[in-house]
Amino acid sequence: MLKTITRVFVRVGDRWMPDPLVIAIFLTFICLAAAITFTDFGFTESIGAWGIGFWNLLAFTMQMILILGLGHVVANTKPVHRVLVSIAGRINSAPMAYGGLAFIAAFCGLFSWGVALIAPAVLSRILAASCQQRGIKVHFPLLVASGWLGASTSMQGLSASIPLTINTPGHFLESQIGLIALSATIFSLWSLSIVFTKLLAIPVVMSRLSPAAGEIREMPPLEIEAVHSHKDLAGSPATPSERMENSRFITLSLAALGGFYIALYFQQGGSINLNTINMIFLVIGLALADSPRHYLQLLGNAGRVIAPFMIQYPLYAGIMGIIAVSGLGDLFVNGFIAISDKDTLPLWTFFSAGLLNLFIPSAGGQWAVQGPIAVEAAMQLGTDIPRIAMSLTLGESWTNAIQPLYAIPVLTVAGLHIRDVMGYGVIICALNGTIYLTALTFF
């Protein structure tokens, strides 16, 4: 039954799912039309809001690009690559490959969403190659989807944007709600129970979605393969400049400098945020690379992964500008709040966050638009603020399974199109929605 339903969604996605860039453009025009129709903004004002918003997330866009690029570098260094090859060699069946990769991605998501996207994507190719060599038939789109969808735990892990934001001194709602400790959000027993359930449920479901033998698609070739060691690079050092470029001492020196800064930062009470995660990735990548030349080669290969974000994040920032400035976001969120009371506000916050995430696929950006309204409603109704923050977090995480933006780096590494995996995203979206709604309704 589950395979039959999945096959339907896979075929629909294969026929109707356009490129993520096309989706972002369509969403832009939908928001423009909605702002003009439902708010006091006219065409000129809406275009102005879009143009101003387009550049408002440049710093955040750079952080996202770095977390993906630097994470890609770490995943492709020789020591990490050896670990991934070792893991792949322990897989002895197709269902074990799907479920195992989903679990690895889910576990990585608890530490960093960037690692949870890149490492399983790299491992999917290594695993597929290993299975081919041993005669194990693996459906590559399902394997890649297992890694992508398993990473949905990341919004309740150490890189969860909203819980980290409201635990950071100086955040924009501090005067209203103060600082909310992580023990009340991602480290609460309620949140940890959801994560534990997903760690078990997603791998089990993915392992049972194997298609018929005649529908299995093997891994496609990539134009660019990662260079895992400086020995893979052509030529040998001949001049002093080339010897410096191939000296491991130089990268280790910079890694030591960064490592000292990280230790000092946390010793002085610093907290985990996107900048510190990127610094940690930079240090690890430099420490594991063979030389500056090798590191730049790895970073150059990562460019394929991060390039689509350079246009898509500004597009979604423009959409966020329309929604925030025109009042369309207020209108949307207030509509859900109007039918809420103290007990049902978390549930309606969840639904509104899930829908809004299709237009603003950024937890931080969504909190900036929806957070103030949701917090004000919670204070008026007497609803628990951490519960509201987590309801918004879960809603944003819920529809990530059908929002193609975060699939882009995974698909780029794997060499697939969004239409190859979106059918599986619908299945996991339904699974996660069931888990979240159960937790919000009964616990």
Image (cartoon, rainbow, N blue to C red):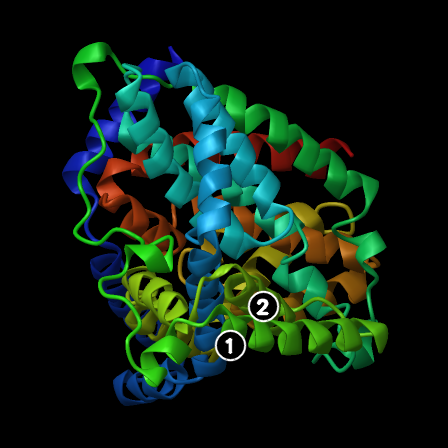
The type of residue carrying mark 1 is: Ile
N-term mark: 1 or 2:
1
Residue in the foreground of this view, choosing between 361 and 249: 249
What residue did someone put label 2 on? 283
Q: Is residue 62 above or below residue 413?
A: below
State the separation of the CA atoms marked 1 and 2.
12 Å
User: What residue is at 20 percent from the left and 26 percent from the top?
Assistant: 217
Q: Around disc 1, counting alpha carbons within 10 Å, would you say few (fewer than 14), some (14 to 19), or many (20 or more)?
A: some
What kind of element bears circle 2?
helix
Where's residue 250, x and y in %?
51, 76
- Whether residue 58 can be seen here: yes
Does residue 9 sit above or below 56 in this rendering?
A: above
Question: Of the numbered discs in the image, which one, if any, rests on residue 250?
Answer: 1
Q: Quadrant location of the C terminus?
A: top right
At horizontal 78% and vertical 57% (from top left) the residue drawn is 386
Against 409, is 328 above or below?
below
Q: Nearer the viewer, residue 224 or 440?
A: 224
Residue at (60% x, 69% y) in the render = 274
Q: Can the viewer see residue 351?
A: no
